Image: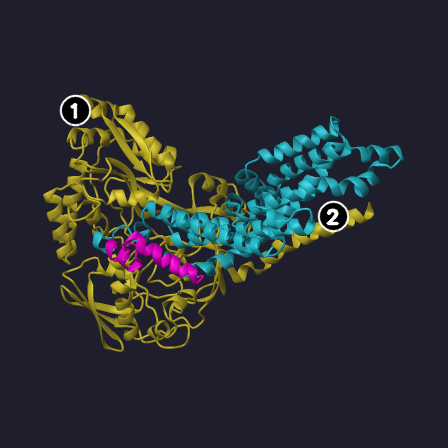
Amino acid sequence: MQGFLVRRLGQALITILGVATLIFFVQRLTGDPTYLLVPETATQADIDALRHALGFDRPLIEQFGGFLADLARFDLGQSVVQRVPVSTIIASRLPYTLMLAAGALVVAIGIGVPVGVVLALFRDGPIAKLAAGFVLAAQSMPTFWSGILMIMIFAVTLGWLPPSSTGGFSHLIMPSIALGLLSMATFARITRASLLDELSKDYVRTARSRGVRTPRLLVRHVARNAAIPVITVAALEISNLLAGAVIVETVFAWPGIGQVTVQAILARDFLIVQGVVLLGAFVTVLLNLLSDILYSVVDPRIVLERAR
Amino acid sequence: MKNRRLLAKAFMALCLAIPAGSALAAKDRVTIDLSGEPSSLDPHVQWNPDSYYIYRNIFDNLLTRDDKGDIVPQIATSWKYLSDTQIQFQLRDDVTFHDGKKLTADDVVYSVKRITDPKFASPQLGQFDKITDAVANDAKTVTLTTNGAYPALLAQLVKLSIVPKHVVEAVGKDAFNLKPVGSGPYKFEAWQRGVSVTLARNDAYWGRKGAFPTAVFRAIPDAATRTANLQAGASDLAANLDGDLAQQLKNSPRAKPVPVLTERVAYLAMNVQKEPLNDPKVRQAIAYAIDKQAITDGVLGGYEKPALEMLTPAHEGWVDGIKDHPFDLAKAKALLAEAGPKARQEISLVTAPVYDQRVVQALQQMLNEAGLKVKIDMTDMAQWLRRMQSGPDSIPQMAFSRWSCGCQDADGVLFPILHSSSGWANAKDKTIDDALDGARQTLDKSKRLAFYKTVHERIASENYIIPLYQAAVIYGAAKNLEWTPTPNESIFLNRMGWKD
């Protein structure tokens, strides 16, 4: 176990270093942000002076060295546009991303799983066809359109919900639905597939022959077994949702990580982009490590020493 | 069943309770939706609309512009030129910062020196670097020295905010940016990152006080959402809408579009050193081929106005009665036929996503209809800016651009675009260079106007650039909000109020 941990931590470090190198140089390849910062009337001398003051005229390798040295001290640097520490900016946006991801997941699972059950139980019936149509429609609607449509209906016309921005729980409802409907289809499909798979197994036939009714059969016998693939998909969806939902965040003026990243990319605010990418890499590496460890805890048949 | 209905009713009541609550508070609070959050609230760092819309309410300047656009006193009560390069300002002595300390000549000097210090690295440096010295003669008098006569100085000073020396020195620039202290009609209260900035009325303000105890500026990136917010009554003012959304607001019972022509001029930039645009006939054909009215009325919804010159009536240096080339497709075709086969070579029209692509495509279509072969070349804004000011050898053949110096003075527009010393320029025209230099060296308004008239006429005859239209900004406002927007794209809270 110990040897495994040391090896995995080493790998994690190399992965993060690789991501840091890649993001640093790829961004620098596109130029620097100086032109975007100065007003149109700035002369070449003004532009050069600002570039020098911001340090973008130093040799790339020197900039990279400075970046790595800062990183070793967990210092992500300062935004060149806002002149605020990148860590402050990310920390202020992260809670909103978590909230929206949680809300979307509740919607996706809350609708997706029951719909999947309906699809499996009433296969080929009219109800299932209706449900399948609903799933398809929800997945096909682009969020920039469904989002603004929801705002027009529920905020402007009916006045039930606030149209945008943050505040209480009511502000979270529409963005969660807009985002959640997209992953709902995935949950419905996986639930349907895994349920059908389980329903065809011997233990189900045995239970039926004993006269167990369908609801009880589902809850007591099938649910647990069918849930495993659904949980796997949920884990994948969480990392997707955490990566930020740029369009939903823009339409609903929801101040999450996705929104700030896109704005930073457009403004060439390199240090924010670096910070977000590194955070993403860190979270992914950490989750992978945790899930590897969890496998062995949950299933003693998996022995970490042998896992490569 | 009964339970379920009760639950549904409770849910509806919960939802309804929220907008009703905010409506009650509406009279005390004005909510303004901008397209982004401010880049900085330190007025010496960034100059972009989402930032200055907010911080210009927190800070005062030496001078300001009134709603008519005239330069009028603010912190300075009067000013006089001691020589062509020295100007002396008398200051008010009843101005206090939000922390209660008095604003003195030292603060003015400190502010000028701070923004012009190359080490401070203000992106705005280029607008003030003609100022070489600032001296406090006494607590109420300040003298500025410029590097040569600088007629646009007053127009630039309208944008130089006065910051409190004692606060900035005590807390440092990073902390000041997060919690700015000024002397303006509104005080900084809170900045919820990515969401909103809240200001509170400065009840001790020396000048016209604001009508609203609280003002909230929110970051709402999507223009359709800003419009929906107005229609839902969730905001009172929204910046940056387009013609289609303005049309939508016209039918709203709650809000209305508020368009205003700005000092920004859209134009077709060309590299007149490169083939085939080095041929005056080709450029003349281009001028005839563009139907400016069709762009402003057909594409943009009628809020913009066709421009005959590179300035607007809001600029010092605007000359009435300049003649441009009226739209005439037959003449354009004939001129291109005269120019011969080289006019048929491919011309790339460089653009970036921030520009209205409908206009760019309309231009392409109009020019191709006349017989040119124009291809659209899309790049990102940083690349666009780099290429456009890279000098005559590498400036792209053609580009759509919009220009504002934020100073309403010809020097901030014509000099960078056309003078041979500027990276944007490629005309290499001695008449224009001389006129621009001449206008820069005199403080005499009528002499300056004569110089600029020469420039306008030369542009119209040589077609180095084609002025297209005076751009509008379209705000949306709640029907009960009283406010007159100005060409310099500012939102001054103390010039707004509620209609009863």
Please state if A166 lies on the left or on the right of B437 as rendered. right
Q: Is residue A50 magenta?
A: yes
- Disc 2 chain ID: B
* B194 up-or-down from A208: above or below: below
Tag 2: amino acid: Ala
Residue B92 position within the rendered picture, expressed as x and y whole percent measured from the top left: 30, 73
Instruction: Identify the element where label 2 is drawn.
Output: helix
B175 and B335: which one is in front?
B175
Image location of residue B87, percent across then percent down? 19, 67
Q: Which residue is mark 2?
A: B8
Q: State the colouring used for the structure image.
A: by chain
Q: Helix or strand or loop: what does disc 1 sit on?
A: helix
Image colour assigned to chain A: cyan
In this view, the residue in front, A239 or B270, is A239
Q: Residue at x 52, y 47 (%)?
A: A243
Q: Which residues are magenta?
A: A47-74
> Is A222 left, or right, of A241 in this rendering?
right
- Specify the amino acid type for callout 1: Ala
Q: Main secondary structure of the magenta part?
A: helix
Q: Position of residue B47 (x, y in %)?
A: 34, 56
**Mark 1 burial class by Cα count in 10 Å: few <14, some 14-19, many 20+:** some
**Residue B478 visible somewhere in the drawing:** no
Q: Nearer the viewer, residue B58 or B472?
A: B58
Instruction: State the residue at coordinates (61%, 56%).
Output: A168
Answer with the quarter of the image where residue A62 lies. Answer: bottom left
Residue B458, quarter of the rendered image: top left
Residue B81 in the image, given as x and y percentages of width and height: 17, 66
- Residue position marked by numbered label 1 in the rendering: B339
The chain whose colour is yellow is B
